[in-house]
Image (cartoon, rainbow, N blue to C red):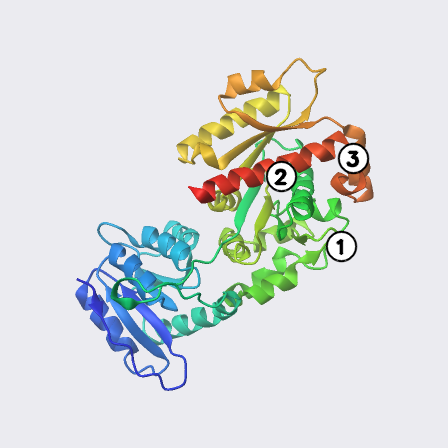
Amino acid sequence: MAESVAPLRDDGEHKIRLLLVDDIPETRENLRKLLFFESDIEVVGAATNGEEGIQMAVELQPDIVLMDINMPGVDGITASERISLQVPFTQIIMMSVQGEADYLRRSMLAGAREFLIKPFSSDELVSSIRRVYQLGASRRQAMPATTKMPAGKGGVAEPMPRKIGRVVSVFSAKGGVGCSTIAVNLAIALQQNVAIKVAVLDTSLQFGDVGVLLNLYASRTIADLASNVDELDDELIADVFIAHSSGIKAMLAPPRPEVADTVTPSLVSEVLRRLKTMFDVVIVDTGSMLDDVVLNVLDLSDKIIVVTTPEIPAIKDAKLFFEVTEALEYERERIMFVLNKADKRINIRAEDIEANIKYAIHGQLPLDERTVTTAVNQGVPYVLGSKNSPLAQATVQLGKRLMSLLDEKEVE
């Protein structure tokens, strides 16, 4: 049975509303004692397991959830993932007696903002709560006012859920197949033909080309966020974006390969989670290595566009990648298989690739080396500079197909 705490009388100042989730009674009581004398923190409830934690987070809408990672039944990771989806403005602080990197990675992927290792002091706990609350302030301000609905059980009005943007990653296990070009042109096609707010994020951290393809000077990059990782908020992230004349906004890769090491997988994950509240669609150009950065991006993607070309090495690598996705238990519905540089003069047809890999091809982009080379050298994406070309038209259709698949998933 969940322990409920009556709300304190409103004294005119907003208190940090905190929900405790831990299966050990002594831990819950100790946490209460640590926070009892903090005038700006109000413990609004305590749940004894992950399932109760999810229910109480939806009902109480707390600012912060203090979540234990190891609990019977629904654990802290699963509970955090569901809370992040159902109550997106609630910030999560994860607690654990273990501090392994894997626990930290899984916590951040699940939506946790900080990770506390037990035992921790009162000062550590209170500082963490206040810091996370401040980091989430801009996110809460960006949330629309709660829309009152007819009262449900107990006469409590239910808030309308906020629509969250979608992340679309563009990946190939083989370099040189055109992922960056597709990512940039697809983003502009969506911005101009579907009329949505689109961002491009370059996570090919060592040798990213998004800036070159858009003819943007990398005055600000994702590396500028590394020094502010503990103070990350929407305003800081917005300052790093560079606007393009097409209407999209781009967050570029670091200017030099050696700077890439400053951008951690957890930073990329946190940036992506925040971008989902700032844009309708975030297109992510990835590197071809399955490192921690790329895996985190793929984990957080609503759609993964896997690109291949009608060449044996590219097809072989695509087949290997699909074997990896099955091992990682990615749903097949999350993957959109695209054939780039399709050419009827080549004896490898789309049907042959589908039969070999056992994945349906969702879109084909025709081979047009002249158009692509001109676009790259001029820094003018072909959907702008050669908008009437078959390649540009096929990219626009690919964007519409992508949005159709995303909308189908949302309805489900």
Identity of the amino acid at label 3?
Answer: Asn
Asked whether, in this view, residue 230 is left or right of residue 371, the answer is left
61 over 259 or under it: above or below = below
Q: Earlier in the sequence, mark 1 or mark 3?
A: 1
Q: Which residue is mark 1?
A: 217
Residue at image position (66%, 56%) is 221
Taking the spot 54% from the left edge, 56% from the top edge, the residue there is: 271
Q: CA distance from mark 1 to mark 3?
A: 28 Å
Callout 3 touching callout 2 (CB < 8 Å): no
Disc 2 residue type? Gly
Q: Is residue 338 above or below residue 52?
A: above
The residue tagged with tag 1: helix, strand or loop? loop
The residue pinned by badge 3 equals 388
User: Could you tell whether 81 is left or right of 248 in the image?
Assistant: left
Residue 81: percent from left, percent from top: 38, 52
Q: Can residue 295 be seen in the rendering of this structure?
A: yes
Dot placed on the residue nearer the N-terminal end, 2 or 1: 1
Where in the figure is residue 178, as x and y percent of width and height? Answer: 67, 34
Q: Assess disc 2: are there few (<14), some (14-19) or many (≥20) residues with their C-alpha within 10 Å of its C-alpha.
A: many
Q: Quadrant of residue 41?
A: bottom left
Q: What residue sits right under mark 2 in the picture? A: 399
Of badges 2 and 1, the one in the foreground is 2
Label 3 secondary element:
loop
| Mark 3 or 2, nearer chain start | 3
> Which quadrant holds residue 310?
top right
